[in-house]
Image: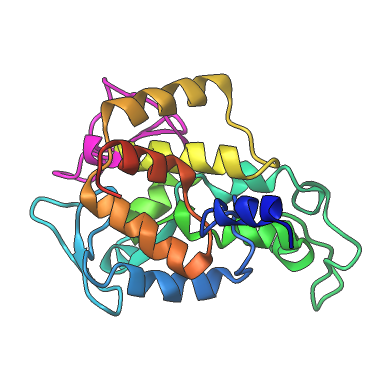
Amino acid sequence: MNRFLISIIAVIPLFAVASNTTNQSFNQAKKQLLSVYQDQRETLYCGAAFDAKGLVITPPGFTTKSHLARAKKIEWEHVVPAENFGKAFTEWRDGHGECVDSKGQSFKGRKCAEKMNVEYRYMQADMHNLFPAIGAVNALRSNYNFALLPAAKSDFGACDMRIEGSKAQPPEAARGRIARSYLYMDQSYPKYSMSKSQRQLMSAWDKQYPVNVQECQRAKKIAAIQLNDNEIVKSRCQQANIW
């Protein structure tokens, strides 16, 4: 091998792959994330602690009027909702000839995309886009895009997560991590593209709510398992001298 090629190889970063190409299983990703969070078990939106089995320790002042059973455990929330990138796949929109249930009925949507499309499965299982959330919060957030809702009231008592008109406003403590997940997915997967308004909001939140040590540590742990960096988070951590 000549010196020129050796010099090129020498500068390739350890995690040179832009997106998830190692794990197609959403269930496997959820199991791996429990180990990622073993030293900082706290949900994204409400800052609720949870144990090794995913059982929620309800934070002071947290209330919910719906999905009471789901309030007892965490769920792994797609910050960029699966539907937002899933609709880019024909299997989600139109189905597939092999997407037929045991009764002979055709189906489409998430189940069909997951069954038939490898690229979709990689996106769905990307741990950089998955965060622990109280199940009831995950349920009410649904697939809604984020927005500023100054006139809305919290749906969860002391946890200032507001849902109104198919939009969601997260607590300030979650906004930076949300923004950098959106920017990562937009950068890493050609199938996903943010709207202009969503890009403006996420870019603003990225600047307004900078990374901290915990966010940088989380990104490193995921990269070690998934073998790709969240380059958005990594660059912000490097700028802050905490990478």
Secondary structure mainly formed by the magenta segment: loop
Which region is colored magenta? Answer: 145-174
Q: What's the residue at 60%, 44% (across, down)? A: 188
Residue 181 drawn above or below residue 23: above
Quadrant for the N terminus in the image: bottom right
Return the x and y of residue 156 as percentages of the image width and height.
22, 46
Q: Residue 135 appears in which quarter of the rendering?
A: bottom left
Picture coordinates of residue 22 (x, y %)?
61, 68
Query: Image height check: is 209 above or below 188?
Result: above
- Front-most of residues 186 and 157: 186
145 and 11: which one is in front? Answer: 11
Horizontal side, residue 226 vs residue 190: left or right: left
Viewer-nearest residue: 243 or 44: 243
Residue 132 shows in the view: no
Residue 97 on the magenta span: no
Residue extending farthest left = 60
Looking at the image, which residue is at 27% across and 68% down? Answer: 72
Whether residue 25 is situated above or below residue 215 in the rendered picture: below
Residue 39 position, x and y percent, is 21, 69
Instruction: Determine which quarter of the picture holds residue 49.
Output: bottom left
89 or 199: nearer the eye?
199
Residue 166 among magenta residues: yes
- The answer to whether 70 appears left or right of 7 in the picture is left
Image location of residue 55, percent across then percent down = 26, 73
The residue lying at 48 percent from left, 53 percent from top is 229
